[in-house]
Amino acid sequence: MLPRKLRFLANTHVPCPCRKRVVTPWPGGVVARAPGGQRARWDADPVPRRARTFSLASVRTLGHDRHRPTGRDGEDANGSGGAGARAPEGHNGNRKPDGGRLVHSAHQSCVICVGNQKGGVGKTTTCVQLAAAFAERGSLCLIIDLDMTAGATKLLRAPTQGWNDSFDLVTGTESAFDVVIDNEDPEITLPKNLHLVPGSARLRDLDHYLFTHEWIVHQDMLLAPLAQLRERYDYIFLDTPPQSTKTTVPALKAADFVILSAMPDRLAIEALHDALRQIQTAKAGPHPDLALLGVLIHAIPSPKTRLARGLLQALSGLPDIAPGTPVKFATDIVRTVVLQEAMQAGKTIFDYAPDHSAAKQYAALADEVQQRIAMHASRARTESAAVRANA
């Protein structure tokens, strides 16, 4: 990460051939910040610099130009460059807003927000391993790391500096497709079918960014980029920070479903109630279609302690998310050192120990998640048919 004084220079960077690295001016040429902070310099003729931050003239937020689909070629649907660029070939981008929310196309993509109001409860582990479980089945999955500590990014051994990251995605300073690290990037090895938008400490500057760009609607910052990314991915997982920050509310506004991760610990269960209240607030206000898929209990001791049994019993007293569907997932993730070993190796449990019981537990969790998503879709179709019949 560049010092704060030099970051202004980074904001007036010249285009980088790979489009995913942050390129900064340097005496005698151009320097690309590669993973680990390495400098790859090549000579270049002076190129007109463009500001990476928004101005009111370029954003035109009141006209919602920031929400036009963008693509790798840096051009919008009218052929002009800038923040409103068209999506890659084969991706149609988002359609017109419907009732204030951007509507994605017929491609059935699910955006799942994974979180809790407390850290150390297996939230990031759940996000990465569940995405890997779906990727193992052939689904194209994307993890967006919205935590300034970049836990998911570090778990996958991806860079937290020198590449476009989730700050660029949230603020719209880069195209949604240009912040994604995929399986074609030779410098980084990700599991097959699993892509990543890395997190970074730059998310700490989001408060200042919003202060200096007062026309940007904070809670809507993820709607436009996710409307574009839905066209490509089957599942998009949002790894949110362990406390309510400037990325938590946009994640809940843009998500279709929420999964809460907790541990058999009193403080974790109390934080779980806070997260449930936050979901209810979102449903009662700007996002009535937001649905809770369930609560996953992570790191359960085997055999279960008396405290663990008591806290699990307390969870069973919560209202069902649907008739006959309890709020707690039937699948529990048992505490095991193999998960820690896999994280240490920078691998998912499916790559590190595919025959281990933990891999089978996450595969069973993926089955439950898929079933609950299908249940919500069926209920939504039934309600829609009832509305049309009464119209």
Image (cartoon, grey):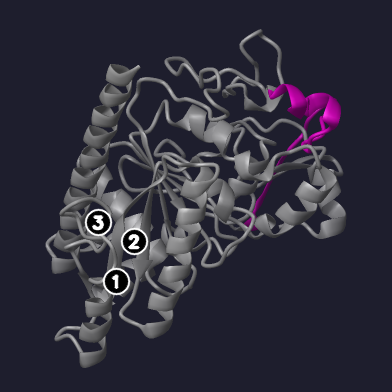
- In magenta stretch: residue 165: no
Q: Position of residue 108 (x, y in %)?
A: 32, 28
Residue 7, relative to residue 302: is it above or below? Answer: above
Q: Where is residue 13 in the image (x, y as percent from the top left)?
A: 78, 37
In the rendered structure, are the residues bearing label 1 and label 3 in contact, judged by CB atoms less than 8 Å apart?
A: no
Q: Position of residue 362 (x, y in %)?
A: 21, 59
Q: Looking at the image, which residue is at 46% across and 15% down?
A: 89
What label does residue 351 carry, if any? 3
In the rendered structure, are the residues bearing label 1 and label 2 in contact, judged by CB atoms less than 8 Å apart?
A: yes
Q: Position of residue 307 (x, y in %)?
A: 26, 89
User: Helix, strand or loop at disc 3?
Assistant: helix
Q: What residue type is labelled 3?
A: Asp
Provide the residue span drawn in magenta: 37-64
What label does residue 239 carry, if any? none
Residue 322, relative to residue 102: is it above or below? Answer: below
**Circle 2 residue:** 126
As measured in the structure, the alpha-carbon distance from the residue carrying label 1 to the one carrying label 3 is 20 Å
**Circle 1 residue:** 298
Count residues near mark 3 (Cα–Cα under 10 Å), then give few for <14, some for 14-19, many for 20+: some
Q: In this rendered view, identify the residue nearer to me: 14 or 135.
A: 135
Quarter of the image where one finds residue 155: bottom left
Q: Which amino acid does label 1 sit on?
A: His
First in sequence: mark 1 vs mark 3:
1
Quadrant of the frame with the C terminus = top left
First in sequence: mark 1 vs mark 2:
2
Quarter of the image where one finds residue 59: top right
Q: Can residue 221 be seen in this view?
A: no
As measured in the structure, the alpha-carbon distance from the residue carrying label 3 to the one carrying label 2 is 15 Å
Q: Looking at the image, which residue is at 58% across and 17% down?
A: 86
Q: In this rendered view, identify the residue nearer to me: 22 or 104.
A: 104
As measured in the structure, the alpha-carbon distance from the residue carrying label 1 to the one carrying label 2 is 8 Å
